[in-house]
Image (spheres, helix red, strand yellow):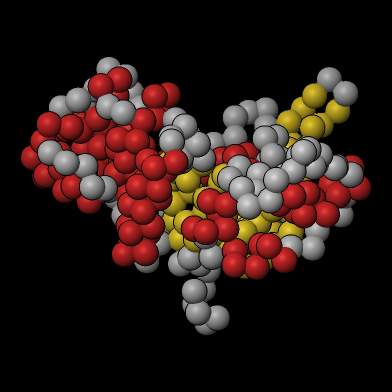
Amino acid sequence: MSDRAPPLLTVRRLRVTFPGEQGDVVAVRDVSFTLGRQRVGIVGESGSGKSTTGRAIMGLVPKPGRITADEMRLGATDLRGLSERGFRRLRGRRIAMVLQDPKYALDPVMTVGRQIAETHRAHVGGGERAARQAALAMLEAVHIRDPERVFALYPHEVSGGMGQRVMIAMMLIAGPEVLIADEPTSALDATVQTQVLAVLDELVRGRGMGLLLISHNLHLVAGFCDRVLVMYAGRIVESCAAGQLHAATHPYTRGLLASLPDLHHRRTMLPQLQRDPAWAEP
């Protein structure tokens, strides 16, 4: 993204809270970032608020969860206080989200082709024939061989890697400006991970989109994204260029990096990740 280009997504002081027996539980604490036509990764441990951040942007935080922000915009559209009907107009068409496991994200009683075509009809319009042709073209775009055959398959009949490609096809068929990918390769082996990421990268770059990639995998994010946001206890504790992640200065980020196995240096014990509650404070 050039310095003059307006961001596709702007988030400032986003906060997500859930009521608890002993008071509010703060899942996301004053998160701020912008996303242009680039690939931004969010990393951190389970429970750090990564997925909740993505869901809040999509308007998918279930009640009684509460979302507040000083600013949360998709282009010129203010997402704060947007009704469910308003979010439904945006989801798919302008912003989309690829979920972690296609086994649970896809409808088990509909063929994958019908699900992709249905997304096209809902957001782009047109008849059944046009939607089918668009779905077949999208299956081909995500490098699925024999799209006619795969179109007629049910979710349980496709592999994990193929299911994830189907999810990507479904989320991109309406041409959104921003894609949020929540652990899109976590259930895949290393070879299939690489293939799925290559497809995602090709489509995101080719369409000039913004990508927010949520992941536990530091190596993956460092090698795939342009910028990295590190989250701890609901807060972004560090932001840096992906190529400079090895030079990160925050002790939590340093701890995450030190916890990664290193094939070139044998260690008798893997370092233990230290945590400081003060890191969650302003």
Residue, x 31% and y 28% (percent of image)?
159
Residue, x 12% and y 38% (percent of image)?
146
Residue, x 51% and y 40% (percent of image)?
183
Q: Residue furthest bottom?
A: 4
Relative to 167, say whether 227 is above or below.
below
Residue 197 location (% of width, % of height): 40, 50
Quadrant where the C terminus is found in the figure:
bottom right
The quarter of the displayed image where residue 27 is located: top right
The quarter of the displayed image where residue 270 is located: top right
Residue 109 location (% of width, % of height): 27, 17
Viewed as shown, does residue 234 lie left or right of 57?
A: right
Relative to 192, say whether 245 is above or below.
below
User: Which of 206/118 is in front?
Assistant: 206
User: Which of 18/254 is in front?
Assistant: 254
Residue, x 67% and y 35% (percent of image)?
46
Viewed as shown, does residue 269 lie left or right of 104?
A: right
Is residue 57 in view? no
What is the number of callouts on the image? Answer: 0
User: Which of 231/275 is in front?
Assistant: 275
